[in-house]
Amino acid sequence: MKRNIKLAGLVAGVSVGAVVAGIVVAAQQTPTLASASGDGSLKPIDSVSKPVAKPSTPSTTTSRPSSAKPGGSGTPSGAVKLTIDLGKLKQGAAPATSYVDGRTVHLGGGKFTLPASDGPVWDVARTGNGALVLHRPKDDGKAVLTAWTNGTRGESVNDVTTVASSADQKSSAYGVQPTTADGTELAKFTLAWRDNPSGETYSLQVNGQHEPIVLAVQGSEVYFSASNKSEKESLYKWTAGDDAAKPVNAVPDPSAVSPDLKLAASIVSTTDDGSCTALIDLATGRKSWATCEYAVDELLTGSSYALGGPAYRDGYGDGLFAAIDVRTGHAVREWSGASSVAIISTVMEDANHILVLAEQGGKTAIARCAPATGACELATPLKKGTGDEDNRPYQLGH
């Protein structure tokens, strides 16, 4: 999922507008999902999402693919739609990925506490024995990225809007976006790569573009998107130390890149009521499939699922999230909050579980859902507070 931070226009605790390419450590132990409660906490809806078709040619129009599987069988995808009720979920294990509970940053075993003067936390990227924490210490809408190692505070960088780490947590990248006095982004930014064990950094100055989003990092390679003055978004790859980034023309409007830098999701068409997204092989530029039912927010290496969100986003939170079969583009499972639950952000916890930050009835929790079964459980207790009230108790990192 994309994880850029628009601080000025967000309430405290809200994650990025279209959630991210979150990076998860595959070596971490997968939490055991508690048994689904028998009191109706998961309620099937008597319908399935429309299947998507594999386009025969790259899509350049706003038309939607026909409702047929590749090969033209017309067989429904069989996606199961479920509603989630936070108040009826059983308590399970804590998240294995990074998350924030109050002022405490949890790193899948280790933890440290942030001072109140750091303000709201917007994102956390793990760095092995620590983390890069993106936070807003002042009410000026600007963020600061602070490094923490073994619970000790390190260097800070101002005006950071995006951060991500590699799957092995040995390297990270972040973007520094300068603005005018009224908060307008200037048409330039700095992309920085960080060797996490040593803290050494390399930087790249980019002119004529703005709004960088770091989508994936592997070793010294960084894949990021940026927008030109016409707001056209493009994908680039940069190797730390090089004088310039190279465009990735096969992915014209990216929404996700896998941590191993093999797959990317690209928005291939848009309409007033949604968008269509294609899965692209970065080595060949070949499109594997396209879906107009969901946006593709995250591609996790080694997982059978792509993390999906609404094809059209508007308003407070998302209405749903989905697990998409990465081979076919068909939804395996969809969860919605109906009218009572606001889906704030989601991230792949591991190859078989999705974490969702959600609000219900003035309270917030992080829940865990399994695409294979559809079962969900609480990964954190339900606590009072929401982003609407500027006191949300939790935040998801990656």
Image: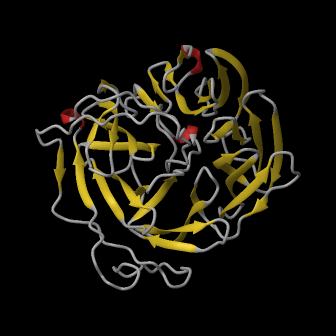
Q: Is residue 283 above or below residue 194?
A: below
Q: Answer with the quarter of the image where residue 286 lies.
A: bottom right
Please, which residue is most extreme toward the right here?
243
Which residue does the image show at 57% across and 42% down from the upper left?
6
Which residue does the image show at 38% across and 55% down from the upper left?
323
Rendered location of residue 179, percent (x, y): 72, 42
Q: How many marks?
A: 0
Rendered location of residue 124, percent (x, y): 56, 32
Which residue does the image show at 56% across and 42% down from the upper left?
23
Rendered location of residue 278, percent (x, y): 52, 69
Q: How is the image coloured?
A: secondary structure
In the drawing, does residue 112 fall left or right of residue 37? right
In the drawing, does residue 258 fall left or right of residue 66? right
Q: Answer with the quarter of the image where residue 327 lies.
A: bottom left
Rendered location of residue 290, percent (x, y): 47, 72
In the drawing, does residue 132 fall left or right of residue 107? right
Residue 339 appears in the rendering: no
Of residues 175 and 179, the one drawn nearer to the viewer in this rendering: 175
Q: Is residue 188 above or below residue 5?
A: below
Residue 127 appears in the rendering: yes
Which residue does the image show at 67% across and 67% down from the upper left?
283
